[in-house]
Image: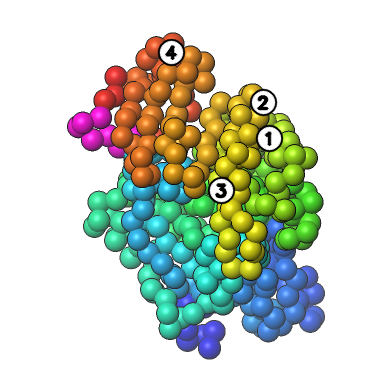
Amino acid sequence: MASTAPWFRVSRFYEVVDPTKGIIRCLICERKCVLPKSIHGFCYNHINIDGRLYDISYGLLSALEPRPIEIKPLFHYYPNSVALTFSGWGCNFRCPWCQNYFLSFSKPKPELSIKLSPAELVSIAKKLKLHGLCASFNEPTIHADYLVDLGEEAKGSGLYLTMVTNGYMTTSTLKEFLRVGYTGFSIDIKGCPETYKRFFGADPLIVYRNAKYILDNNGHVEIVYLVVPKANDSQECIDWVINKHLEYLGEDVPLHINRYYPAHKYYEPPTSIKLLLDIYEKARKAGIKYVYVGNIGDEAYEATRCPRCGKLLILRRNYRVVKWNLTRDNRCPRCGEKINIYGKPILNSNRTSK
């Protein structure tokens, strides 16, 4: 099957552990699954065939649609642009509250997939006159070989490359993403060490390590903290997230505080709006310049205000920019504060840019 199925590809991200027994180690994410022959990895997308790591879902897409960049959420990255958003199958985490569990908890399904090569995906985005490409819905990291090839194919196309990720890739994988042109990363922080240990068997400091590495290499990061009752909503956990954000990433990196709703196997009621607003105020007082609250339908908490003088600079409604009041070099027109914006905004004629 490996020699005939077009979605089977030998991965570039593995090492041999025991050549005699054919045991290998996957190097895509920080789980670093050790795989004897014929064994799948945690994410369902890779298998050891005769001592080599195969990606068994190359080009199998579970969804494909144009979506606003603000919905990722990425508020400071090519504002008001639209990205061709795509996903595969599987994940390297098992969040019991996952909204997309029907994709993330599934093995690759060739019979239900949209089959597209990287070149075909770039061609569709260009034909639709979109601004970029975004890997989302399930965890993009596990499709590393496809994403790297997509980056190579997209060079010179004028399309930006971005992803929505849990940030749990190895540094070697991340280096490849950056090398081929991925510049925007919406990264989930799922709580403090207790949360990661209890639900994922993982380490959140790896997420911050990777986010910092992106920033240090001229990429753009926005952090998303989905506040889940009885999972990551204790005051100790909240304080840990805010403190680590400032320690690793600094005051200019946006923090999105999002409301959880029951899904899949997690049945706690939706996050208290009061708690979300309390976290918002705490994060701002701690020194994070750009703090937003999502999934509550209040545009006041999705607007960008000048962190120095408080002037309303960017108003968003239904994931679109409806007011833009920055100078051409992204400064507050009142006090001159430089605002952290990556990429050129896509502004219509009825919006102002001073």
Q: Which mark is residue 242?
A: 1
Choose top left, top right, bottom left or bottom right for residue 18. bottom right
SS for callout 2: helix
Q: Magenta region's main secondary structure? A: loop
Q: Which residues are magenta?
A: 345-351
Disc 2 marks which amino acid?
Ala
Q: Which callout, 4 or 1, points at the residue further toward the start of the chain?
A: 1
Looking at the rendering, in which quadrant would you find the C terminus?
top left
**Vertical relation: 328 (above or below) 99:** above
SS for callout 3: strand
Q: Which residue is mark 4?
A: 336
Q: Which callout, 1 or 3, points at the residue further toward the start of the chain?
A: 1
Q: Which callout, 4 or 2, points at the residue further toward the start of the chain?
A: 2
User: Toward the viewer: 267 or 304?
Assistant: 267
Assess disc 4: are there few (<14), some (14-19) or many (≥20) residues with their C-alpha within 10 Å of its C-alpha.
some
The answer to whether mark 1 and mark 2 are in CB contact below 8 A is yes
Q: Which residue is mark 3?
A: 259
